[in-house]
Amino acid sequence: MRAPVWDDSLKCGIAEIDAEHKQLIEAMNDLYIACYINPAPDDIRAFTDRLIEATRSHFAHEEAEMRRSRHPDLKGHQAEHRELLRDVTAIRDRCTERLDATSAQHLLDHLRNWLIVHIQTYDRTLASAPPAGGPAESGH
Ligand SMILES: [Fe+2]
């Protein structure tokens, strides 16, 4: 597995969202280093928790932005976010005591592969949402 790297192919065109995606890539990089380059078992759990929390708060922010811009696919997009969070949380929670490097690598691979596809498909539509006009989505 290569190190997670930010590049222009991941830009979705909204500066704030791009900045958060970049931060997620950086958080993945920290976990990558702790798993593959400079093994640090004590850091793995902390970096994994931090990555999951950064992902959760980014999704909440992205969904708030979609609500604000009345994006037509808020519900479908939210469902994608929830599924990913459920998957990575399940991987983490299978290890009740110490999160071993293999599980963290699995979590990292899954999150990275998912995020790249998600950004390049779903998040690309964020900048091109139709102008506000209809009622705002509640998202519930
Ligand atoms: Fe998204």
Image (tube, rainbow, N blue to C red):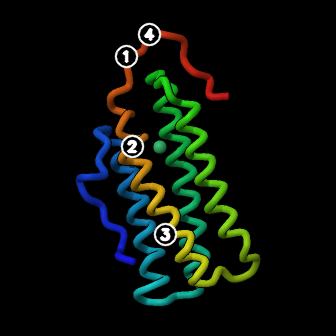
Residue linked to disc 3: 109
Q: Nearer the viewer, mark 2 or mark 4?
A: 2
Residue at 48% across / 39% down in the picture?
62
User: Label 1 to label 2, Cα distance in Å?
Assistant: 20 Å
Secondary structure category for the residue under label 1:
loop
> Contact, CB < 8 Å: mark 3 with mark 4?
no
Residue linked to disc 1: 131
Q: Does label 3 or label 2 sit earlier along the sequence? A: 3
Q: Does label 2 or label 4 sit earlier along the sequence? A: 2
User: Label 1 to label 4, Cα distance in Å?
Assistant: 6 Å
- State which quadrant residue 49 falls in: bottom right
> Contact, CB < 8 Å: mark 1 with mark 4?
yes
Instruction: Please determine whether, in this image, residue 65 is positioned above or below residue 18.
Output: above
User: Label 3 to label 1, Cα distance in Å?
Assistant: 36 Å
- Check disc 3 and give the amino acid type: Asp
The numbered mark at residue 133 is 4
Q: Position of residue 30 (x, y in %)?
A: 43, 74
Residue linked to disc 2: 121
Residue at 32% across / 38% down in the picture?
14
